[in-house]
Amino acid sequence: MAASVSAKVPSRVQSNWSRRLSYVQDAALVCVSALFFYVHARHVIESHSVTNVFFAVEQGLLVGMFLMRRRSENTSTRPADWVVATIGGWLPLALRPHETGGSAELIGAGISMIGLTCVIVSFATLGKSFGVVAANRGLKVGGPYQFIRHPIYFSHATTMTGFVVANFWSYNVAILAIVTTFQVLRIAAEERVLVATSDYASYKERVRWRLVPGLY
């Protein structure tokens, strides 16, 4: 009996730790996002440019979905997964307006608009099964998930690429490169959890590509 009780303690402790850290993350994300929207809203007002509105709207949707997400008991407690998710999920908020000028702004805005449209479609399919840290919130296989396994990451990368094209600057390019690297690591962590806690392995056999068909 004693052995049975002690065996359950680590799981309960991990669950409580994960839940508390999740609430801290929620509060921090609200503060960071508020600063992000202030910077971009002020830029739109001062420059009268709406080039970056699509990216700002996408980030707002991401934050809203994150705060309304379904809580999961199968959230990874690996510190490395939390670091990867934090950098991959939050660092895009560090991107700053720096208009390139000319046709690059129109091209970038067009790419961001496509990315935002894909984000909305993906969110409509995913519902509240959205999160930052690797977790099992239910397996989705419909909509864009029939073609690639991580359509939201693809959509986010598209919107962010559009922003960088319209705001081409070494600082923004570096942020894009770092975020892309950590998003790939984030995908690996997420799939590790899903394979261990669902029938994700069979889903992987049906949908081969993670982000870009024929490439990755």
Image (tube, rainbow, N blue to C red):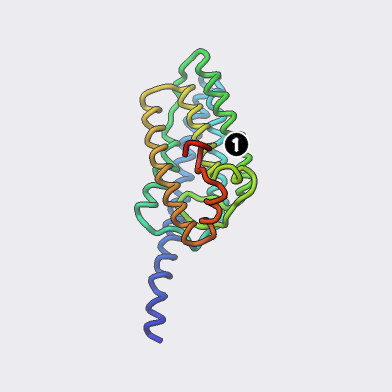
Placement of 164 over or under 195, stated as above or below:
above
Which residue does the image show at 41% across and 34% down from the upper left? 94
Placement of 198 over or under 102, stated as above or below:
below
Please state if 103 lies on the left or on the right of 24 as rendered.
Answer: right
Which residue does the image show at 54% across and 37% down from the upper left? 155
Position of the N terminus, as image quadrant, is bottom left
Observer-nearest residue: 189 or 160? 189
Circle 1 crowding by C-alpha within 10 Å: few under 14, some 14–19, many from 20: many
Placement of 200 over or under 186, stated as above or below:
below
Determine whether the residue tagged by mark 1 lies in a helix, strand or loop.
Answer: helix
- Which residue is most to the top? 102
Residue 208: where, in percent of width, then height? Answer: 52, 45
Residue 132: where, in percent of width, then height? Answer: 47, 49
Which residue does the image show at 43% across and 54% down from the upper left? 24
Q: What residue type is labelled 1?
A: Cys
Please state if 32 lies on the left or on the right of 114 as rendered.
Answer: left
Q: Would you identify the image quadrant in which residue 9 lies?
A: bottom left
Which residue does the image show at 43% across and 31% down from the upper left? 95
Q: Name the residue under label 1.
A: 118
Count of marks placed on residues: 1
Residue 103: where, in percent of width, then height? Answer: 52, 14
Observer-nearest residue: 166 or 177? 177
Residue 70: where, in percent of width, then height? Answer: 56, 56
